[in-house]
Amino acid sequence: MNAVQMTSMQRTLTTLGHREPDRVPFFLLVTLHGAKELGLSINRYFSKPGHVVEGQLRLRAKYRSDCIYNFYYAPLEVEAWGGEVIYSDDGPPNSGEPLIKKFQDIKRLKLPDIGNTPCLEKVLASARMLKEKTKDEVPIIGVVMSPFSLPVMQMGFDRYFDLMVEAPDLFWDLMQINEAFCVNWANAQLKAGATAICYFDPLSSTTITPKDLYLKTGFEIAKRTLARIKGPTATHMASGRCLPVVSDIAKTGTAIIGVSSQENIREMKIACKGKLTVLGNLNGIEMCRWTPAEAEAQVKHILSGAGAGGGFILSDNHGEIPFQVPDEVLMALSEAVHTWGRYPLDWVTDERGI
Amino acid sequence: METIVNEFMQALLSLDRLAAKRILENTVKKVAPMKFVEEVVAVALERIGAGWQDGTLALSQVYMAGRICENLVDEVLPPGDPDRKDQPKMAICVLSDHHKLGKIIVYSVLRAGGFDLSDYGVMEVDDLFQRIQKEKIEILLISVLMLPSALKIKLLKEKLTASGINIKLIVGGAPFRFDDRLWEAVGADAMCKTASDVISVIKTIMGGKI
Ligand code: B12
């Protein structure tokens, strides 16, 4: 099996089955670089689904990534609820003024109608076009914010922490409506052509929420939400840490965990063995100043720590490569995984435990 | 004092404002409020910050602890109280970014540590450059969350250098926690990985060591 070259889809499915494919799958989660490829501003790039389709296809051809990433930007979801999005020339769009100004506003929130919300429709349109063009050769990744993480953009981080302490009933009301949105939004993307959904949930990371609180909140919310999403899911901590809760995350029904560069990748792989596929954990911020040689060394370091036995996908630690990362570094990452990621990883001397 | 610090920290971590207040009230019967601030509040917040940095505590605990302490300290040392430190003129802002939580936490830590400082809110480079000159700021604290915002600090530094202005820049926020060299690359004088480290950095600056 290993000698035969697999498609990106076969490679990914094999690793998800905790077996070794022909080589380590490489998920290069680039979004903003598509604008660079097309010579467009970031704002214009995201204004038409056709741009994103063209950008993703060009980026995949260039860097030989094993997935297509149909992610626009996180604040798109608050735009759907009537919130403000602020564009930048050299970075991802950000959410603006919170749409929930007082806790009581939660009672008045109206669930967005997925089919009638132009910003969401763009994402569905690009999912359909990408599916049409790539068939089942490569996984198309759709993205949702978790119901537990979305409120940071809906109401601001400090007010959200205050809400949890001061008005727990309203917190649960907000979770209920956010869960409904998240499920509808994920299922619409799956129906349009996404192969799997990446569930961004950094609020559940131990960087943000203590374990005991996570078990009462983010964990229960994820279990309920993922059960209603009609397709495979990956959970991403967006570079927050999660080792102390990773065995709980495995119980939420997810297949993959996106891991921070602040984690020891070998320890994480051992903790996830047979339960979750590990996705990670190249440091996207540091990557801006890496030389090609450093990029190669980082790939080798991660592969030697977590590659053996499958159950592993090489990627960045956040779920999006910063706009400032030079093309030559992305190319070096790609070359390194194509060179050093071929199974069996016989250059790795210590595979104990992984 | 060690027992008091531990009890106070426990009160903060269990979000028990009343218990924290009781400890403060009992202690300031015996020692000066400033001593309590320096030897209990600042130490407890520093340990909580260190716990976040090593992964044993979470941000929600850091935030809540800062908030509780800020309010308590304001009661015993109101803003402008002569007992508040003889300190450099300081301001804090979020630079070209829409994320205010980092700034809110650092502000709380400093106020809870007995410092006074101006809160500029969200600023862009040019306005900030004008304002810190006009107000003769000696230490400027900058918080960012997005990488492009972090990179803008370099523009501010270039303007300051070109005008021969010597203001100390202390920076912080997620991008700096992911790249240890970024703070130097943008021309800052110091960086803190966690909010509570800021007190010792300011003390070092005041001692003329930075
Ligand atoms: C939770 C999270 C999310 C949540 C909520 C985000 C939010 N705050 O709005 C969600 C899922 C919504 C999200 C979305 C996005 N995120 Co996000 N997210 C995170 C995460 C995990 C924590 C962010 C956070 O708010 N922390 C709380 C603040 C207070 O922490 P902090 O900045 O570190 O501050 C502490 C210290 O650094 C210090 N400090 C801070 N400032 C200062 C200043 C001074 C003077 C001092 C002394 C100390 C100090 O004090 C604080 C407490 O100790 C980080 C990664 C991470 N592990 O930190 C990524 C991160 C912030 N996200 C990032 C990005 C890019 C995004 C998106 C733009 C992605 C996209 N393309 O859509 C969106 C934008 C969202 C928006 N609001 O518009 C990047 C930003 C850097 C970059 N690449 O440009 C990060 C750093 C991830 C990464 N490793 O690259 N995200």
Image (spheres, coloured by chain):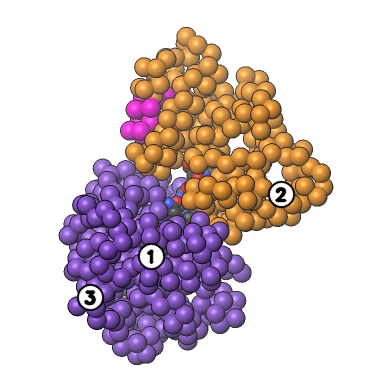
Residue B1 rendering spot, x and y as whole percentages: 42, 15
| 2 vs 3, front mark | 3
Residue located 27% across and 46% down the image: A244
Locate residue B77: give its quadrant.
top right
User: Label 2 is placed on what type of residue?
Assistant: Lys
Disc 2 residue crowd, few under 14, some 14–19, many 20+, Cα 10 Å: many
The residue beneath circle 3 is A2
Residue A278 x %, y %: 28, 60
Residue B157 bears which disc, if any? 2
Q: Crowding near pointer 3: few (<14 within 10 Å), some, many (20+)?
A: few
Residue A235 shows in this picture = no
Residue A50 as seen in the image, left or right of residue B110: left
Subunit bearing disc 3: A
Mark number displayed over residue A315 = 1
A272 within the magenta span = no
For the residues labelled 3 and 1, the Cα–Cα distance comes to 21 Å
* Of the pair A132 and B120, the residue shown nearer to us: A132
CA distance for labels 2 and 3: 54 Å
Chain B: its colour in the image is: orange
In the rendered structure, the residue with mark 1 lies on which chain? A
Looking at the picture, tell me which residue is in the foreground, A270 or A340: A340
